[in-house]
Image (spheres, grey):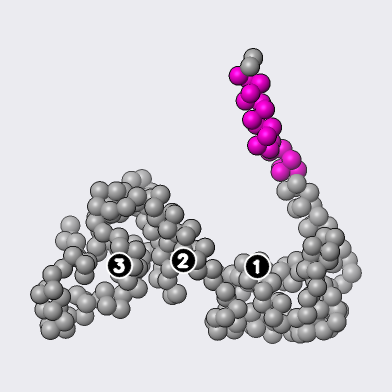
Amino acid sequence: MASRQQLPTEQSVEDLLKIIENNKEEDVAGVTDDVLSFILHFNIQSGDQLVLQNAMYELYCKWSQNPVSRVMFGVKTSKHFIKHTIGPRHYFKINTDSIRIQKETLKYIEKNKLDRTKYPSWQKHFKSFLDFYKIEKGNAWVPSYVLMHFYDKWCHNNKRKSLLSEISFFNFCKIHFESKRNTESRMMWFGINKEFVKVHLPKQKLIAMQQVREKKHAKKQKIKNKIPSTKTRIKSKNKIRTN
């Protein structure tokens, strides 16, 4: 088994100076290593707690601006922590537990909600979608789910792995098109060019899309109605106790 590499926080000043003097790139990888920077940022150290690699990777992905792959994360992290495999799952022995890792993930997401409209790579991604379908600003109003449908289709056909969430997608739409909200249904509508509507949205297709959406909504509502409310569950428990 390969010996565990010490973290910079575990090394003495003398050892760190020797590394710099010798200019050994493999030893000073931590200076520019994204994964090691993540470990140091959250003060993760060796310990006795078994924590899922996937839990650590999830937090890392939220923290990093350019995360490495899951496999590469495992390779880099295993240089610093003892790795355990139980069945199909991989764990690391560190100084904190899974609950804290999960809390840190939620806290980080809350503090650093990513506004993808400000990132050039996502701006280019959205523009590629618009250019493909030749969608422009106009006075033909379509519901938001129609544009989302064509975006999903475009991503699927191009085998895109990185997708915009509904919220991020609609934020981009608000920047590029005039928008208005239906006060009754709360549905967002966007003004686009008539040419796109003529080519891609014949009346029958629009009706079919609306029917599919209504079926999905009805299915969700049916499932929601089956789940008893908190008050109902409490009343049921109290009845059992009194009986």
Residue 231 within the magenta-colored segment of the rendering = yes
Measured along the vertical axis of the image, is residue 21 above or below residue 68? below
Mark 3 packing: few (<14 Cα in 10 Å), some, or many (20+)? some
As drawn, is 128 to the left or to the right of 218? left
Q: Residue 26's spot in the image, x, y percent?
A: 21, 76
In what element is the residue under mark 1? helix
Mark 2 packing: few (<14 Cα in 10 Å), some, or many (20+)? some
Q: Are marks 2 and 3 in contact (CB under 8 Å)?
A: no
- Give the residue at x 60% y 78%: 117
- Give the residue at x 28% y 54%: 94
Q: Are marks 1 and 2 in contact (CB under 8 Å)?
A: no
Q: Residue 162's spot in the image, x, y percent?
A: 55, 71
Q: Which residue is mark 1?
A: 167
- Is 242 or 83 nearer to us in this picture? 242
- Give the residue at x 80% y 73%: 180
- The answer to which of marks 1 and 2 sits earlier in the sequence is 2
In three-dimensional space, the C-alpha distance between marks 1 and 2, rounded to whole angstroms, equals 17 Å
In what element is the residue under mark 2? helix
Q: Amino acid at mark 3?
A: Leu
Q: Name the quarter where the N terminus is drawn.
A: bottom left
Q: Residue 28's spot in the image, x, y percent?
A: 22, 77
Measured along the vertical axis of the image, is residue 156 above or below residue 54? below
Range of residues picked out in magenta: 222-241
In what element is the residue under mark 3? helix
Q: Which residue is mark 2?
A: 62
Q: Residue 152's spot in the image, x, y percent?
A: 67, 68
Residue 55 in sight here: no
- Is 87 or 217 nearer to us in this picture? 217
As drawn, is 160 to the left or to the right of 61? right
Residue 40: numbered disc: 3
Q: Which of the 4 quarters of the picture holds residue 65?
A: bottom left
